[in-house]
Amino acid sequence: MNEALRKTLKQLRLSGLSESLEIRLQEAAGHGLSHSEFLELILQDELAVRADRQFQRRFKAAEFRERKSLEDFDWSFNPSIPRKQVYDLASCRFLREGRDVLWLGPPGLGKSHLVQAIGYQAVKAGYTVLYRSVFDLVRDFLHDEVLGQEDKMLTTYLKPELLIIDDMGMKQLPRRSGECLFEVVMRRYETRSTMMTSNRPLEDWGKLLGDVPSATAILDRFLHHAEIVRMAGRSYRLRHESATEGKEVEDSKPAKAPSGSEEGGSNSKPAKAPSGSEEDPPDLKPAKAPSGSREDGKGGAKTQKKR
């Protein structure tokens, strides 16, 4: 490729085409491609590069804690988790229909994993996504309110086609949290989809927000078009601890005593005492008393008679 052509492609921002042009020229010559076939190939290369760059930008803007996927989730640990419902959400149909989603269940069941995995699928499908914990949301608004930039922050939360608000119910939120959350939910109502997770039942939201009227107003709007995913089971984080405890119990069992030891039971037999020992009574015979001793009855009687 000559330098003039390279500069022209750069001015047109056709970097994807520029990267593959040399290979495509060789391919066209080797396979006898027509001009239209060659043109289609290099344009497809450019579109593929642009699509990948757009995906990377959307993924970075989503601000996930980490990349999660449904394939990485351990479905066998809690079989009661509604797998079919989760995969239906991953199809992004709820986004096309403008519905919201609420995940309810105790900590440790994988709610954060699943909402980030669904968010990742939405990014792949071309949607803009923003993932934030409820604590981040409140902190963002209270910080920008001090700086007088709350309108700018509100735009950040209203723009994404999918907003994921995680960790509702982990602990009580700061004062005025209810106002911040209500503003976001109200402004997104029936215009953009919102997904939330909660570790606590809905009746506790008033205490968590410290504002019962705001909690009531939030739930009234959010639940109007929301699909609810209910989860129950064991904590996914504690599965390794349970396995470790089981191993410790197994390791703590006493070892089997070797055959012939004191703990050998019926299989152990006492060793035979050596001949002439205290434990061999049948072989013990009294020694013969010497002639003329006190123990020689007959000999002694004859001696006395002669005297």
Image: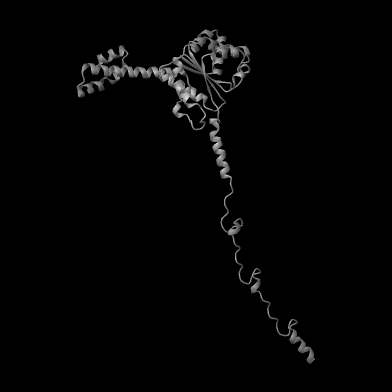
Left or right, 63 with respect to 44, comes to right
Q: Judge whether 181 appears above or below 75 on screen.
A: above
Q: Nearer the viewer, residue 285 or 99?
A: 99
Figure quadrant of the C terminus: bottom right
Residue at image coords 62%, 12%:
213
Left or right, 295 with respect to 12, comes to right
User: Quick check: can you spot residue 150?
Assistant: yes
The count of marks equals: 0
Residue at image coords 65%, 73%:
282
Residue 216, x across and y down, in percent: 60, 13
Residue at image coords 27%, 15%:
6
User: Quick check: can you spot residue 128?
Assistant: no
Corner quadrant of residue 106: top right
Q: Nearer the viewer, residue 229 or 239?
A: 229
Residue 59, x across and y down, in percent: 43, 19
Residue 238, x across and y down, in percent: 55, 32
Residue farthest along the bottom direction in this orientation:
306
Corner quadrant of residue 301: bottom right
What's the image's color scheme?
Answer: one colour
Figure quadrant of the N terminus: top left
Residue 276, x across and y down, in percent: 63, 72
Left or right, 136 with respect to 51, comes to right
